[in-house]
Image (cartoon, grey):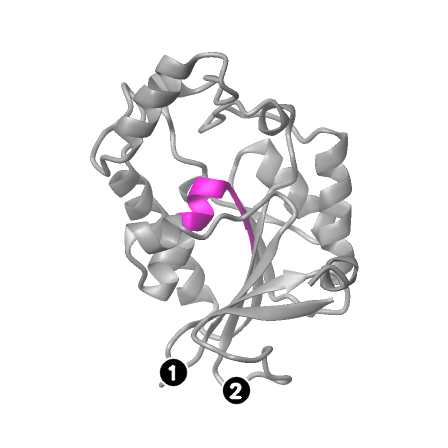
Amino acid sequence: MMFIPVLGCRQGPEEPPPAETLRVYLARHGQTDWNAKRRLQGNTDTELNETGRRQAAELAARLDGIELDAIYSSQLRRSRDTAQLVAGERGVVSLAELNEQSLGEFEGAYLDGRDPQTVTEFERRSADPNDTMGGGESIEQHLARVEEALELIRDRHPSGQILIVGHGGTNTQILRALLGLSAQEAGNIRQSNSELYLIELAPGRDPRLWKLIPSEKLEEL
């Protein structure tokens, strides 16, 4: 497997990293039935399905041999259980601030085309960063609480290596905050349930981002 550059670099990460560097391995939780059915989950506490558990086991294998100082997840089961499968007998720190954006009246809605009117309405309203989605949470509110989690994490870990297992929307806000991206730039980075990113934060240098490409995928490039 290999990490390929996404932002701020032209080659793979250095080994070992520069002193006082924090490396954040950023994973999305494994697949759930709602993912497979293209239903909006938001803050609904869904569980991993069989594919999701396999993806979590694959994530653990990919991180084998990497000394992690801590493993963080949200408090939703799909994130926490993915992180725990990686952690094994180690503890996982679960933070509510890393939960997925609450989508209010849109939670549970299908995006598979069966209800085009709802899809159109969701896309229109989610384009407004201050829309609370009918009793949910706006993108800007979500970003603010994700930033609270990152402040706590970075205070605990000014350097070293950590894993965060988040959600599609949460990880977008993590990338936005750590890399200084605009909302549109961060939204253009789509992380699947099986993808792993590496963010490197080093003093005196712009943040850098890589995406892991498993060996079986390298043959397709």
Dominant secondary structure, magenta: helix
* Quadrant in which the N terminus is drawn: bottom right
Of the pair 182 and 116, the residue shown nearer to us: 116
Residue position marked by numbered label 2 in the rendering = 18
Above/below status of 109 relative to 9: above
The residue lying at 71 percent from left, 29 percent from top is: 49
Which contiguous range is marked in magenta? 164-173
Q: Amino acid at mark 1?
A: Arg
Q: Give the percent coordinates (x, y) of residue 177.
A: 34, 58
Q: Give the percent coordinates (x, y) of residue 129.
A: 24, 38
Badge 2 vs badge 1, beta-carbon distance below 8 Å = yes
Q: Give the percent coordinates (x, y) of residue 135.
A: 28, 20
Answer whether residue 88 is visible to the viewer in this image.
no
Tell whether position 197 is magenta.
no
Q: Does 214 sit left or right of 94 as displayed?
A: right
Q: Give the percent coordinates (x, y) of residue 121.
A: 31, 20
Secondary structure at badge 2 equals loop
